[in-house]
Image: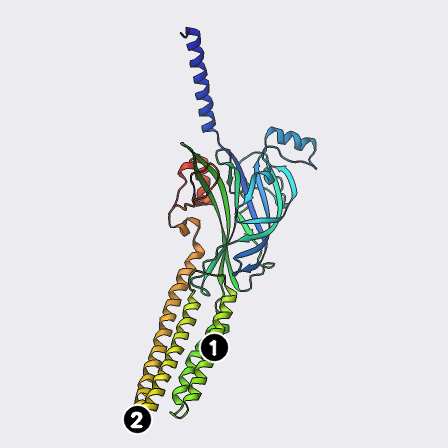
Amino acid sequence: MATESDIKLQVELAAEATKESEEKSNKKPLEIGVYIYIYRVSDVSLSDQRFHAYFHIEFQWEASKEDLALFKKDAENYKAVSWIPEENFVCLNGKFEELKCTAFKIAKKGGTTTWDMAIQDVRKDCQFNLCHYECEGDFSEKFELSNFPLDCQDLSIVLRNLSEIEQVSFVPPLVKDYNSGGMSLESSQLETYIVHNPRVEYDVMKYEYSVGDEHFVSKFSKMTFRIKLERKFKIFGYKIGIFVFVTAISSLIVFTMDSDSLADRYGTLLTLLLTMVAFQFVLESMLPSLPYLTYLDYYIVTSFVFLALMILQTAIFSAMVRWGDVDVAEEFDIVCFILLIATFIIYHLYFLIKGCKARKMELSKLEMSGIDYRLNKTTNVKVGGAGHKDALFEDHTVLAKDFLEVIDKNKYSDVPTK
């Protein structure tokens, strides 16, 4: 039987545990301001669905007492202990070939950054760590090519913190003099694209999994630097589109040949058909293996079918000349000539209208963020693993200006999705 002192001790322990739990839940995470500057983007490969980038990252976070003591003791060889960047973040869509820390310091308002920029305005009036990294590597990107070559694309670099969001969270730079990111166009090899303003997004990644009867939920902070590209489609029109157009319309010259030149008709049409096949091979060499046809694929295939119809018409005309009335065959040839001209005009008008609509839709992607792509739907990806029944990843994206409000209110489970 429990004595009065035992009961009193249990009550005190329960109250202390409740107090510690409340303090932990009310404690704000360490905010890591992240700034990215892209110096060079090159080797954008549609077939391999990847790109190469060289960029700088600066992490900014409030210095602890231990950090201040270490910096005061040896500023030249200073390394923070409150958060160690290279051990606490990963890139989700690529691998760093180079990740080199080039500067580490503590600064405050009125000082200078690792870029030797004057710090005039800050989000927190405190002394904070500034850690500068040079990064280089290849990054994967799943290109959306259904409207190629009228498409617009994103090149994304996605960083995720390894600590849960209750402990550490990525936020916009603590130095207000910075934007959240920037990019140099002079050294980037993007001649076939028009580069638009990049977007920086701060996400909460929710990871749910079950082990036996227990259910676990973990949330991690994620940052996405999204480069917006608009393809210069005219070059593809000049190199492929015009030649396909000329090849298709050239097939109509066979109607100028009389009924004694059927062999020449077949020769001309089959040569043009092989030319169309060659264009399709050229296009396939530029693109990855896709489970769907692109806009340009549809145009080439339609022109191929048009040539096949021309060959079919020639075969029927040839049979009518050989076994029927030549006059009737020539009347049939004239009617087919008119119908095929109409068909040629109609399908080109169709692709012109379809192309205008596709381009308008693609241009709207230049203003889209991650949440716009997901159309306010959760992205669930099942993954396997020892002891895991199932796992779900849930992304909620907000832009930098909205994320600050979320962080200040400490509402990590209610990140806005629109």
Q: Three-letter amino acid code at disc 2? A: Asp
Q: Quadrant of the N terminus?
A: top left
Local SS, label 1: helix
**Residue identifier under label 2:** 327
Q: Mark 1 to mark 2: distance in Å?
A: 32 Å
Q: Please provide percent x and percent y for residue 153.
A: 48, 58
**Residue identifier under label 1:** 274
Q: Of the residues under marks 1 and 2, which one precedes in the sequence?
A: 1
**Residue visible at 40% across and 63% down?**
358
Q: Is residue 268 visible?
A: yes
Q: Three-letter amino acid code at disc 1? A: Leu
41 relative to 295, above or below: above
Toward the viewer: 306 or 17?
306
Toward the viewer: 332 or 348?
332
Toward the viewer: 72 or 258?
258
Q: Please provide percent x and percent y for residue 61.
A: 56, 37
**Residue visible at 51% across and 40% down?**
170
The label shown at residue 292 is none
Q: Residues within 10 Å of mark 1 (few under 14, many from 20)?
A: few
Disc 1 + disc 2, Cβ < 8 Å: no
Q: Residues within 10 Å of mark 2 (few under 14, many from 20)?
A: few
Local SS, label 2: helix
366 relative to 117, above or below: below
**Residue 89 picture quarter:** top right
349 relative to 126, above or below: below
Q: How is the image coloured?
A: rainbow
**Residue visible at 69% across and 31% down?**
73
Q: Please provide percent x and percent y for residue 274.
A: 47, 77
